[in-house]
Amino acid sequence: MEKEELKENLENSETLDTENNAQSSENDVSEDSAKDKNLETEKKEEEQLTPEKELELLKDKLARTFAEMENQRRRFEKEKDDAYEYGGFSFAKETLNLLDNLERSKVALENDESLKNSDALKKILDHINIINNDMLSIFKKNNIEPIKSINEKLDPNLHQAMMEIEDDTKEPGTIVQEIQKGFTMKDRLLRPSLVGVSKKKAKEDQKNEVKDEKNQ
């Protein structure tokens, strides 16, 4: 009985080995088949690239390369032009402080009681005005221009409103006071003008004025 069982086990083992070998052979065949298909596909693709198509691809690559080179050249030219035109932008902006100091000095001297109506004050103010005008002339030669403000409509791109001033003779938003002069350099803003703009008088003030007129 034991011999028969042993024989049967051996036969089963041989059967399993045979099945495994067969499966392995099938897998090898399928892998080889897949490789052959890939090779065939690659060959077909190579065959499809005719000399004419290869030439077209090369032309396309060349056109893209030239386009990229042209874009880089244009960027370089723009950067060079900007550096030439606006290279002194920071220097010009700092120089505006000299004009501000001249203006402050002029106002301080005009308000000095000990100098009022004196020949000395007149001479000093004349010299200050000459220096101020010379600086403005140099600025103009370098395309630096003062921004128009008084009686102009407020432009957020050029003006910065610092206060509102009641004035019924002007349209609301009209500049009626210039606190600090602004400047442009070609098409760029060096600094905005600091200004005061008009607004309508409050209704209560208007009513009080009407009452006062009636009482008179």
Image (cartoon, helix red, strand yellow):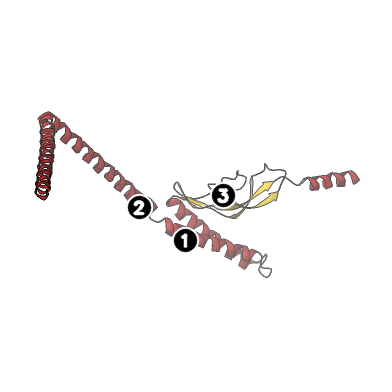
Picture disc at residue 159 = 3
Query: Residue drawn 29% across and 48% down?
Result: 76
Secondary structure of the residue carrying tag 1 is helix
The x and y percentages for residue 74 are 30, 43
Q: CA distance from mark 3 to mark 2?
A: 26 Å
Q: CA distance from mark 3 to mark 1?
A: 19 Å
| Classed neighbour count for the residue bearing mark 2: other residues with Cα under 10 Å, few (<14), some (14–19), many (≥20) | few
Residue under pointer 2: 83
Secondary structure of the residue carrying tag 2 is helix
**Upstream in sequence: badge 2 or badge 1:** 2
The x and y percentages for residue 91 are 43, 59
Nearest to viewer (mark 3 / mark 1) = 3
The x and y percentages for residue 65 are 21, 41
The x and y percentages for residue 123 are 58, 64
Say whether residue 111 is left or right of residue 90: right
Which quadrant holds residue 117? Answer: bottom right
**Upstream in sequence: badge 3 or badge 2:** 2
Q: Amino acid at mark 3?
A: His
Q: Amino acid at mark 2?
A: Ala
Query: Residue drawn 37% across and 50% down?
Result: 85
Picture disc at residue 94 = 1
Secondary structure of the residue carrying tag 3 is strand
